[in-house]
Image (cartoon, rainbow, N blue to C red):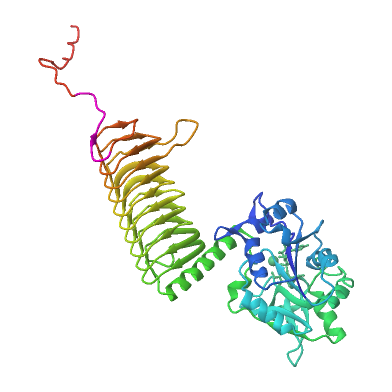
C-alpha cells in the first residue's frame, strides 16, 4: 500500500503574496497541481495533503478534492511535525512517500526509482550540488552507508563541506515511520521537529537506508520566491520545447515558446516566436503558426496556417484553412477545409463551410454558413437583441456584400447575393439579389457652404 504525504503548510513569505505559495503556477497550473498529478501517476492508495497557511484556500483549489485526505498543521513546527499531523491518516502498512508542495517538477520516474531503492527500508532522494548551502547534508560512513542527515544550521565545518544534499523527498516503511515520528524532538538549532531525524533512527534500528537521485537536478528545485518561480518556469518551458523539437516540431526559437497545457503535433509543424498554447491544443501535419499567436483548447487540421497575432479559443480549424493575421476565433467556431479568415474578423459559435471566406473586418456569431460563401468586409451578424441570442443561417454559394448587417434570426438562401450596405431583417430568397438601401440621389445646383467672413 502506498501512502503519499504532500507537505504544503509553509507560508512562503518570500513570495510576498496573498496567494498561498503552492497555488502559484508553473505553466499555468498551480505548483501543487503538478505535485498531485505526478503523485497520482504512481497510483497511490492514499494521498494526504498537509496544509497550514491559507489551508482552506489550498484545499478548495484542489480539483480532485474527493480523492484526497487533508491534515492541518497549525502552527508549523517543522517538516517532522508536518508529517506527524498526517500520521493518523496513514494506511496501516506498505510504504509512505513524502513530497513537498513547493517542489513541483519531480518526475514520476524519479519517484518510482526512489520507491524501488527503498525496497522494504528507507530511501532519500539526494543530489550533489556545487553550492550545497542551506540544504541538509547527507552524512555517510567510510563504506558509503548513509548515517544521518544534518541540517545546514546544525552542521560543523566538516559536515558543511559535504556536497551531497537532501532534496527533502523520502520514502519509508509506513509502520516504522509511525514509530520514528513519535520519537522526534526539537533539540536543534532551529527548535523544529525535523523529519530528517528519522534517518538516524532507521540506522540505529538496522533498517537499511538507500538513496536515489533525480535524472535532472531541476526536478528537485523548490520555489521560495518569485525569482525561483520564474526560473523554474523557464526550466519547464525549456523541457517542453526540447521534447517538441525531438518529436520533429520546428520552433523558431525554443526560448520564446510557452505551453500551458498539452500540445499534440503532427509531422513538420512550424511554430514561430512568442506563441502561447493553453489547455489541449492539436496541430495537424504541416501546420504553421505565425508569431505571437495564442491557441487555447483548439485543433488545427493538416496544412492549415494561423498567421501572426491571432487568438483562437475553443476553435476547430479545417484542413488547409488560413486564419489571420489578427483574427479572433472564439468558442464553438468550426472552420471548413480551405476556408479563409482574415484580419480583424471575430467568430463565435459559428460553423463556416468549406472554401468560404471572411477576409476582413467582420463579426460572425451564432451562425451556420455554407460552402463557398463570401462574407464581405464589415459583415456583421446582429445575433443579440439585448436579451437573447439568435441564429443566422447562410446557405451555400452566397455572396454577402460589404458592410452588411444580418439581423438574426434570419436566413439567406442558397446562391443569394446581398447588396453592399444591406440591413437584412427578413429572409433573403435563393439565387436572387436582395438589398436594402436608400435610393441614391444627386441634388442639382447644391453648393458647399462658404466660410463666413470675420467681422472687421
Ligand atoms: C528541508 C529539509 C532539508 C532539505 C530541504 C530541501 C528538514 C528538517 N530539512 O529543509 O534537509 O535539504 O528541505 O529543500 O526536513 N513544511 C511544512 N510545515 C513545516 C515546515 C515545512 O509543511 O512546519 C513544508 C514547506 O511548506 C515545504 C517543505 O515542508 O514545502 C520544506 O520546508 P522548508 O522550510 O523549505 O524546509 P527546509 O528547512 O528548507
Ligand atoms: Ca526549502
Query: 298 and 99: which one is in front?
Result: 298
Q: Which residues are magenta?
A: 430-439
- Locate residue 73 relative to residue 281 in the image: left or right: right
Overall secondary structure of the magenta section? loop
Q: Is residue 418 left or right of residue 228?
A: left
Instruction: List x then y, in percent, for residue 418.
Output: 26, 37
Q: Let me know if residue 419 appears in the view.
A: no
User: Looking at the image, which residue is at 66% across and 57% down?
Assistant: 63
Tell me which corner region of the image, top left, top right, bottom left or bottom right, holds residue 445. Answer: top left
- Is residue 11 in view from this perspective? yes
Q: Is residue 281 above or below residue 198?
A: above
Q: Is residue 7 magenta?
A: no
Please give left or right for residue 148 compared with residue 341 in the image. Answer: right
Residue at image point 67% right, 69% down: 39
Q: Is residue 350 left or right of residue 10?
A: left
| Quadrant (top left/top right/bottom left/bottom right) for the C terminus | top left
Residue drawn at point x = 80 percent, y = 77 percent:
94
Residues 99 and 288: in front is: 288
Q: How many numbered marks have been drawn onto this rendered protein structure?
A: 0
* Residue 93 position in % (x across, y down): 83, 76
Q: Position of residue 89 (x, y in %)?
A: 82, 65
**Residue 123 locus on image (x, y percent):** 74, 81
Amino acid at each position: 500500500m502506498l501512502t503519499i504525504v504532500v507537505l504544503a503548510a509553509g507560508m512562503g513569505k518570500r513570495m510576498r503574496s496573498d496567494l498561498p505559495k503552492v497555488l502559484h503556477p508553473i505553466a499555468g497550473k498551480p505548483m501543487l497541481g503538478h505535485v498531485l498529478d505526478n503523485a497520482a501517476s504512481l497510483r497511490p492508495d492514499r494521498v494526504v495533503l498537509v496544509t497550514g497557511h491559507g489551508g482552506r484556500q489550498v484545499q478548495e483549489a484542489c480539483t480532485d478534492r474527493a480523492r484526497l485526505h487533508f491534515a492541518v498543521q497549525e502552527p508549523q513546527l517543522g517538516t517532522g511535525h508536518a508529517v506527524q499531523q498526517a500520521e493518523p491518516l496513514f494506511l496501516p502498512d506498505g510504504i509512505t512517500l513524502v513530497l513537498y508542495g513547493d517542489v513541483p517538477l519531480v518526475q514520476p520516474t524519479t519517484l518510482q526509482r526512489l520507491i524501488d531503492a527503498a525496497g522494504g527500508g528507507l530511501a532519500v532522494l539526494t543530489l550533489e550540488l556545487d553550492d550545497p548551502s542551506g540544504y541538509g547534508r547527507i552524512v555517510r560512513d567510510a563504506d558509503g552507508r548513509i548515517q544521518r542527515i544534518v541540517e545546514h544550521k546544525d552542521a560543523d565545518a566538516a559536515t558543511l563541506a559535504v556536497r551531497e544534499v537532501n532534496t527533502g523527498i523520502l520514502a519509508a516503511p509506513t509502520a516504522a515511520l509511525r514509530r520514528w515520528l513519535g520519537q522526534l524532538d526539537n533539540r536543534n538549532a532551529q527548535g523544529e521537529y525535523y523529519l530528517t531525524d528519522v534517518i538516524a533512527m532507521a540506522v540505529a534500528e538496522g533498517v537499511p537506508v538507500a538513496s536515489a537521485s533525480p535524472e535532472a537536478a531541476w526536478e528537485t528545485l523548490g520555489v521560495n520566491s518569485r525569482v525561483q518561480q520564474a526560473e523554474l518556469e523557464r526550466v519547464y518551458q525549456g523541457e517542453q520545447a526540447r521534447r517538441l523539437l525531438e518529436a520533429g516540431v520546428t520552433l523558431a526559437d525554443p526560448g520564446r515558446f510557452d505551453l500551458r497545457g498539452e500540445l499534440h503535433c503532427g509531422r513538420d509543424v512550424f511554430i514561430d516566436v512568442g506563441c502561447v498554447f493553453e489547455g489541449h491544443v492539436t496541430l495537424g501535419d504541416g501546420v504553421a503558426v505565425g508569431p505571437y499567436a495564442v491557441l487555447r483548447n483548439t485543433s488545427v487540421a493538416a496544412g492549415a496556417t494561423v498567421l501572426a497575432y491571432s487568438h483562437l479559443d475553443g476553435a476547430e480549424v479545417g484542413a488547409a484553412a488560413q486564419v489571420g493575421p489578427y483574427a479572433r476565433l472564439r468558442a464553438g467556431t468550426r472552420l471548413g477545409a480551405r476556408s479563409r479568415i482574415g484580419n480583424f474578423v471575430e467568430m463565435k459559435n459559428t460553423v463556416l463551410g468549406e472554401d468560404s471566406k471572411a477576409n476582413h473586418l467582420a463579426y460572425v456569431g451564432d451562425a451556420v454558413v455554407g460552402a463557398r460563401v463570401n462574407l464581405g468586409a464589415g459583415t456583421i451578424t446582429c445575433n443579440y437583441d439585448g436579451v437573447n441570442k439568435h441564429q443566422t443561417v447562410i446557405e451555400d454559394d452566397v455572396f454577402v456584400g460589404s458592410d452588411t448587417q444580418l439581423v438574426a434570426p434570419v436566413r439567406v438562401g442558397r446562391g443569394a447575393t446581398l447588396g453592399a450596405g444591406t440591413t437584412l431583417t427578413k429572409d433573403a430568397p435563393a439565387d436572387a439579389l436582395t438589398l436594402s438601401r436608400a435610393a441614391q440621389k444627386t441634388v442639382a445646383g447644391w453648393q458647399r457652404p462658404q466660410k463666413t467672413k470675420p467681422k472687421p
